[in-house]
Amino acid sequence: MTFSLAERFVSINGEAQCAGELAVFLRFYGCNLRCSYCDTVWAQERMPGEQMTAESLCAYVRETGIRNVTLTGGEPLLQEDIGTLIVLLGEWGCRVEIETNGSVLLAPYASLCPRPCFTMDYKLPDSGMESAMRTENFDLLQMQDTVKFVAGSRDDLVRAEEIIRCYDLTAHTKVYLSPVFGNIEPAEMVEFMKTHRMNDVRLQLQLHKYIWDPEERGV
């Protein structure tokens, strides 16, 4: 079994709980959503890419000497047999983070041992993809996991606050608000958080887009 990679590289985590820490990124081709603000459109379609087995990917990660591994895409959980790779990386002592778009059921992966960490999006109205969200995933999340709300407008912020409150998300997982780059000012988001007393919610900026060109790959 081989996996189709769009790219693999070492950089810092740009978001979520390990933001600022070094990580190995394994980006896979293919996504089932088409978000309006997608910043990896080039990885949406299933492409041949670089073909690597789970064992060869683990060997690559070990060679880097980096402990954090981020599986991203596209949507990495669409990869056939991705569970095998997750388990192998975990057994080799890696902290495995899965960046998932919120439309894929997490139950098969939350039961893996070692269990990976999830950074799960909840797609807000401006994305055009909210109808694809699987809210049953919320029940599986723990404090090592993250729910990320990417907001492009005040209406998005209103919806995020509603979902956070309705599912009491901050009681059992970490919650982050992030702006659609260039669409909404972070200061406006902070004012919204203050007005609505959004305790235990964190504002997040995508570090890599401030350090490097926002369109640059492999960072």
Image (tube, rainbow, N blue to C red):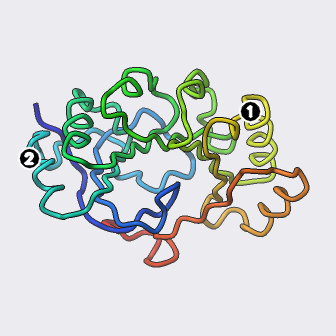
Q: Is residue 10 above or below residue 147?
A: below
Crowdedness of circle 2 by 10 Å Cα count: few (<14), some, many (20+)? Answer: few
Eye-nearest disc, 1 or 2: 1
Q: Specify the amino acid type for callout 1.
A: Asp
Q: Kindly report the distance in space between the C-alpha atoms of the residues bearing marks 1 and 2.
A: 41 Å
Q: Residue at x 59, y 28 (%)?
A: 138
Give the percent coordinates (x, y) of residue 205: 59, 65
- Name the residue: 43% across, 44% down: 99
The quarter of the displayed image where residue 31 is located: top left
Q: Position of residue 69 (x, y in %)?
A: 31, 52
| Tag 1 residue | 168
Q: Which residue is mark 2?
A: 56
**Residue occupying image coordinates x 22% and y 27%:** 81
Please tell me whether mark 2 sits on a helix, a strand or a loop.
helix
- The residue closer to the viewer here, 204 or 114, is 114
Residue 152 is situated, as x and y percent measured from the top left of the image, at: 69, 54
Which residue is depicted at the point 35% across and 52% down?
42
> Position of 68 compared to 177: left or right?
left
Horizontal side, residue 126 vs residue 19: left or right: right
The location of residue 198, given as percent across then percent down, is 81, 50
Please tell me which of labels 1 and 2 falls first in the chain: 2
Left or right: residue 56 versus residue 134 is left
